Image: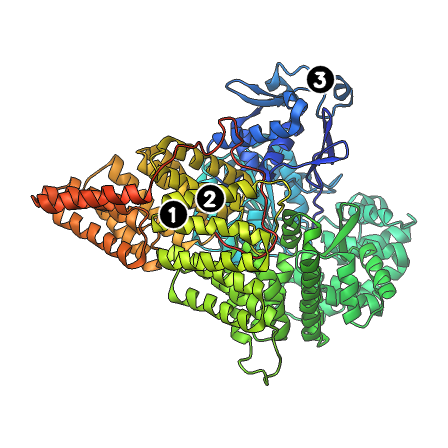
Amino acid sequence: MDSTTIVACSPPVIQIGQCEIDTARRILRRGNEVLEIGSRAFDILVTIASASGRTVTKDEMMASVWPTTVVEENNIYVHLSALRKVLGADAKLIVTVPGRGYRLVLQPDSQRTGQPGGNANVENDDDASAADGAVEPVHRPLPARIPKLIGRQDVLDGVQRALRTHRTVTLTGTGGIGKTRLAIEVAHRMRAEFPDGVVFVPLAAACDAQSALDAFAYATGSRLSATSAGLEQIAVDWRDREALVVLDNCEQVLDTVAAVAEALADASSRTRVLATSREALRVRDELVYQVPPLTVPASTDSASDVLRTPAVRFFLARAQADGAHLSFDETSVRLTGEVCRRLDGIPLALELAASRAAVLGIGLLAANLDDRFRILTGGWRTALPRHQTLKATLDWSYGLLSKDERKLLRWLGMFVNGFTLDMACAMAEHAGLTRMAALDAVTGLVSRSLLVSDPEGPTYRYRLLETTRAYALQQLDDNGERFRAAGAHATLFLQLAEADHTRWIERPIVEWLRHFTRELGNVRAALEWTLCGRGDPSVGIALAAVTVPYLYDLSLVDEGYRWARAALRLIPRDRQDAFHVSHEARLRLVSGLAAALIYTEGPLSETREAWMSVLNESAEAGRSDYVSRAHWGLWNWSQYAGHARDALTFAQRFGDLARSTGNETDVVLAARIEGVAHHYAGDQSRARQLLERMIEAYDKPLDRWRAIGLRIEHGILARATLARVLWLQGHREDAYALAARSFDAAVRYDYEMVTCYVLVEAFVPIALLNGDPAAAKRGIDVLNDLSSRFGFTIWRACCSCYDAWVATLVEPGRNATERLAAATEELCSTGFLGQLPVLRCQLGKALMREGRNDEALNAIDIALLHCDQNGNYWHYNELCRVKGAVLRRLARRNEAQSWFATALDFAKRNSASRHVAPAPANAAPAPAPQPVKSGQYCC
């Protein structure tokens, strides 16, 4: 049967000294105290603890914790340092093995039990590893293997041989033939042959390129764009790996899966792909393995021969597991052989039949099966025989259900990626069933193998098998219920989303995001139905208004932008139209659209108009919270657009409103954005004063701020800007150190938008200004990866400028200079002009170095004009100095001296320094993440 049950391979609780690791809930405890650590640090801790004393190499660690992201080894050190601080006295149990990696010092009690934390002799790690006989997977755990596959030994041997000689092996065959179970068994048997582990990617719920890549990303612990950039990222992440990737249930997304398989094969000659599909992928070096049915008995076989055939053995094993009490007299055995033969030995059909045999007995089952399969000879001649058999089996199984079970099965077909019991009962209510009837129906469907139950903590999550869900949806259409069921599904997820939105503060935001990610497939299906012309648009608009902020928190900014725009297009312009949309919903959508636009399109006029719309509507409605949000958004737009004067105005308005309303959180945040605005306006003394005040207030333990819609960590961002200020005040080493600490803190915080901001605003430009192109290049590589993967257009364009800047330093010449000129023009096309002064300044220096003095002067004059028009003076004195240098080369000495004097005077007036260290020498890189609690404020 093409289905699996995913179970955890590691113990649910691992003891380390006085601490316990709860792997299921991802919690670290010491007694009754929950210890706070970042997600990457937690993954490192689990990786080391699960090795049971074996040394975990740095390569293994990076493959496990960052499976699809290229990172520096320094990331391990950063997270381990944070982890050891949290562990306290137990930190000594994690030791560094010089030149090799890290291991857990085991304790005597654990040695006897064989659990992590024991005191086994670990001097010979290689021998211990070999004794294990297998390499633990570095990605999400493999599904559990079936205790015994009946009649499949030849197939298993053949598939293993094929994988050793071909890069891609595709198991083909009809639905229910057992492709998934075979693939799982092969993966378990061969895992020791792949040092980089085995990855299982379930694609049954995938319906398009995006959801297919989402499934791959989830299985590998990464995020991928549903574009060519996603495939390019796979090629980069999987370069030179030696792993087995199982792509399960590919037929509905064949083109995308084929492209993924090609990318994996191209990335490494030692990576193998094992796919299950109803047809071949048609990729290079693919071996197509047609999975045969189980061997069935001939009509002339004796009873003993019938009992030895794989199909009968499988049928009897499943029937007995379901509680059947079958006799083995000659008549019963003959009827069993007949049932297996008429089902063509297809495991899914056999399993469904076996569950019915437990209720009906073999005689009644055979009689019903005969009636149901009469359609095989008089039905659709154009269909493949195996498809006919599976359809007949499903029709027969469906016919044996009660009326309530049939209806619930149909309506459950609307769910994507599973559902809870409460969700099933809610759908049942929409279908006209009582909760008790729904509970009975769910029980019946589970017992008949039409509904799969997966353990989820103390409860279960349910899902339909791929073929069963397709059958249920077809039955919905045949019964004329699809419209009602899809509407009920969308309404249900609107209700769930609204309920979650009112209770989000009860749990950490990261926990809510995990919950939202699990239901993302259902949310997308509901939005697609309601916003694309088929369902109730009022439901879709309300659902988009609630869920767009969550997409933002997952860095799925482009998707949030698309749903916000789709919802806004459906909002009636006149209140007399068919339905009315609340001010709250509209304000959320326009705010979400504007916040996304600045990153996906740039700070263009449409973005500003959207924020002005929020400002006007919220002021008219008396919503001071959204007035604050609009002022913040207009500050953010002005800042990115390089309009420093306007940015300062909007930042001060935000602060004035915060002080007038007594909103203490916003008062603190106002100090940050006013500090940023003063920095860009050229007043570094005032900027430093405000930023240091904000950091001091923000670090107070009582200020635990959280928000839905944007989990920006403002303390990290404030330090990034402070680093720039310190550099301009002449504290270049302090600035560089603070920028590096901010970057490390952003990596620990593990939110892509924060990391990109720190790289763009602080780490990369300060590294370049300090003449360290190697460090800058490392930051640029991370920035390029994140900005490309998540569609941050402005940061990707800025990344190209920084990369060209590096080229002017390490390989100066016309090619590098032209690259910088072209990249700067591309950046200008996005409207992102905040960094224009420093980029034009570097371009002028490069041109001057080549003797192209007139062009250099023009580049500098363009930048100076921008500064004068917009008040963007943060790099003004250096522009003046470089202009003086160019004029001196042009023998215009008097003019040159005037510009040198202007540069010096501006520096004295606006960058007066006072040497105060930004943080104690022994200070942690950054405080624990403290998300904001009120408002949705972007970077």
Q: Nearer the viewer, residue 765 or 451?
A: 765
Who comes first in sequence, dot 2 or dot 1?
1
Camera-side mark, 3 or 2 = 2
Identity, as a three-letter code, of the amino acid under mark 1: His
Disc count in the image? 3
Camera-side mark, 3 or 1 = 1
At 92% from the left and 49% from the top, the residue drawn is 325
Separation (CA) of disc 3 from disc 2: 49 Å
Who comes first in sequence, dot 3 or dot 2?
3
Separation (CA) of disc 3 from disc 1: 56 Å
Residue behind mark 3: 119
Residue 600 lies in quadrant = bottom left
Identity, as a three-letter code, of the amino acid under mark 2: Leu
Q: Nearer the viewer, residue 781 or 148?
A: 781
At 80% from the left and 69% from the top, the residue drawn is 429
Colour pattern of the rendering: rainbow
Secondary element at tag 3: loop
At 81% from the left and 72% from the top, the residue drawn is 432
Secondary element at tag 1: helix
Q: Which mark is residue 679?
A: 1
Up the image or down, 254 lies above or below 63; here it is: below
Residue 830 as seen in the image, left or right of residue 593 = left
Secondary element at tag 2: helix
Who comes first in sequence, dot 3 or dot 1?
3
Residue behind mark 2: 691
Q: Nearer the viewer, residue 104 or 332?
A: 104
